Amino acid sequence: MRRWALLPGAGVGARGSTVRKDPVPDSACFLKAAKAAGAVISFDLNFREKLWSICGGRGRASEVIGRIVQNVDVLVGNEEDLQQGLGISGPEVAAKSKLDPGIFIGIIEHLTKKHP
């Protein structure tokens, strides 16, 4: 049986905004323990602008999340999460816009170049 560990992005943002300025050490501890246990590590970006605005905004989110993403096996997110949470450029995404798979695939290709 394969173990799976999920690190929620909203939790990272909340931790950064309420408990400490840099949530990466706690996340790194979790990632290290999960890896040692042989788990597949997934990270759900689940970008929440309100949480990140308290501790530095999108720039800070991109820095922190970028450091975390380097240590995960599976990354979960939509276009908006990738653009806002990781600073990946792409078209403006609206809540009611239709999904264009070509655009999403382009964003993923850009992401895999930035974070192999």
Image: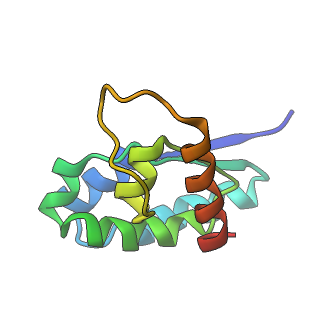
Residue 57 coordinates in the image, percent (x, y): 20, 65
Q: Is residue 77 left or right of residue 51?
A: right
Q: Residue at x 87, y 33 (%)?
A: 1
Vertical position of residue 40 compared to residue 70: above or below: above
Specify whether 20 is left or right of 2.
left
View extreme (right): residue? 1
Residue 30, quarter of picture:
bottom right
Residue plotted at (30% across, 30% down): 95
Regarding residue 6, the answer to whether it shows in the image is no
Could you tell whether 51 is left or right of 44 in the image? Answer: left
The location of residue 84, given as percent across then percent down, is 34, 56
Tell me the colour scheme of the image: rainbow
Q: Is residue 60 left or right of residue 17?
A: right
Specify the quadrant that holds the C terminus.
bottom right
Residue farthest along the left direction in this orientation: 54
Q: Quadrant of residue 54?
A: bottom left
| Residue 29 visible in rendering | yes
Q: Position of residue 50 (x, y in %)?
A: 16, 49
Residue at image x 51%, y 66%?
68
Q: Is the residue 3 above or below the residue 17 in the image?
A: above
Q: Position of residue 92 (x, y in %)?
A: 33, 48
> Above or below — where is 38 with respect to 115?
above
Taking depth in this image into account, of 113 and 76 the one nearest to the observer is: 113
**Residue at 31 percent of width and 25 percent of height:** 96
Residues 21 and 29: in front is 21
- Report the number of numbered marks: 0
